[in-house]
Image: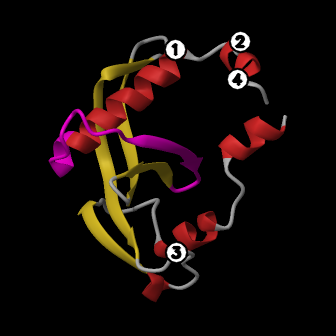
Amino acid sequence: MKLKTIKSKKSDTEFTKYVFREVDLIKEKCGISHDVPVYFLGYFYFAQIFLCNGKIYCSNVDMEYSETREPIIDTMFLTELYEITLLKEYPKIIDDIEVKTIITNENPNFSIDKFLFWIDEPCDINLEIWL
């Protein structure tokens, strides 16, 4: 897809605010400087997935909702956060990654098996380029 085509696509400003707020929460919790770039890799069934400084961050959030069920992004907070270091370029088994639990809850969405399954999934960026 040409850059001109990508730039012409309409964006979802609410989703953009959502992602930027989540990035801010991750940076704050992990002590990452605000001038360090964090890349949003996408969403999978278990978490939103980000890349920063060679580490993968998997997070889930919650927030309050208005009476019309609109999310109130300023009330967002992390419910799960995991920092993953790849020990091999292409991880296939649990010994190929190192997982650090930063925030968890009683019924986590994240699991190592789900993460390893995600590694083999096509990425949303590739889908956009091929369309």
Task: Identify the mark at residue 8; answer none if there is no mark.
Answer: 2
Identify which amino acid the numbered label 4 is placed on. Answer: Leu
Identify which amino acid the numbered label 2 is placed on. Answer: Ser
In this view, the residue in front, 5 or 14, is: 5
Few, some or many residues within 10 Å of mark 2 (<14, 14–19, 20+): few
Q: Secondary structure at mark 4?
A: helix
Where does residue 21 sit, x and y in percent of width and height?
33, 28
Instruction: Give the residue drawn at x 27%, y 39%.
Output: 36
Give how far apart the Cα atoms at labels 4 and 1 are: 20 Å
Mark sitting earlier along the chain (2/1): 2
Please name the residue that numbered disc 3 is placed on.
89
Identify which amino acid the numbered label 3 is placed on. Answer: Glu
Say which of marks 4 and 1 sits in front: 4
> Which colouring convention does the figure follow?
secondary structure
- Is residue 89 rendered to the left or right of residue 130? left
Identify which amino acid the numbered label 1 is placed on. Answer: Thr
Relative to 86, residue 3 above or below: above
Q: Provide the residue span drawn in magenta.
A: 28-46
Looking at the rendered image, the quarter that the C terminus falls into is: top right
Give how far apart the Cα atoms at labels 2 and 1 are: 14 Å
Say which of marks 1 and 3 sits in front: 3
Q: Secondary structure at mark 2?
A: helix
Give how far apart the Cα atoms at labels 2 and 3 are: 35 Å
Please name the residue that numbered disc 1 is placed on.
13
Q: Is residue 33 magenta?
A: yes
Where does residue 72 sit, x and y in percent of width and height?
36, 19
Looking at the rendered image, the quarter that the N terminus falls into is: top right
